[in-house]
Image (tube, grey):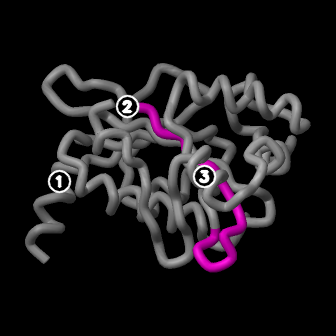
Amino acid sequence: MLVNDGVWEFETDRLSVGPWHAVADRLDIDLARVVAEMLTVRTTVALPESWRGDHSVETAWGWIADRDADSSMLLVAESTSHHPVGLLVLAEVPLSSSGVDLRIGYLFAESGWGQGLASELVSGLIEWARAQPAIRTLTGGADPANRASVRVLEKCGFSLIDDPDPGVVVYQFELSDSRSGAQDN
């Protein structure tokens, strides 16, 4: 891990975000139950095929193990109630020059839809990433039919980039451009 020695935590006005196992332990919640409740047909329809469908607590444990093997998973909870409302997926991709491209994905429970939480999460991630010198870019993809996710990326300042996969639109945020502006304020 190149980023912040693997410390993946930040807060926004309404959200607290941190490594899912640590947050689940701290909140004394069953991570598999939370994941199973979030992974519904509606919440997973635009995700990779192996992520789709309803999950039971038993299948959620396998899903959790698979995600632990390929990325850093963060649990998104409401700051005041500590109720889990979403997941943030982060994967570091080394760049040829130096630093990393941080690939991002997110999922919110249906109860969190339509409240601006995804925009707040991505904006908070950008602010956190500005303090991580190794991160050069943030890249997120969305199913073009998932207009809500596309709007979140655009609203947060991501730019559309080319990608060979016709089922996914890929957006990128250049941190080097935003760091100089952040330091001038």
How many residues crowd mark 1 within 10 Å: few (<14), some (14–19), many (20+)?
Answer: few
In primary-sequence order, the first of circles 3 and 1 is 3
Residue under label 1, please give it.
Answer: 177
Task: Read off the residue under disc 3.
Answer: 75
Which amino acid type is marked by label 1? Asp
Residue plotted at (78% across, 38% down):
45
Q: Is residue 54 visible?
A: no
Q: Which of marks 3 and 2 is nearer the N terminus?
A: 3
> Nearest the camera: 121 or 153?
121
Magenta-drawn stretch contains 81: yes
SS for dot 2: strand
Q: Is most of the magenta stretch helix, strand or loop?
A: strand
Q: Residue 167 colored magenta?
A: no
Return the residue at label 2: 92
Q: Which amino acid does label 2 sit on?
A: Glu
User: Spatial distance from mark 3 to mark 1, Cα to Cα?
Assistant: 28 Å
**Is residue 49 shown above or below 107?**
above
Horizontal and vertical percent position of residue 176: 17, 49
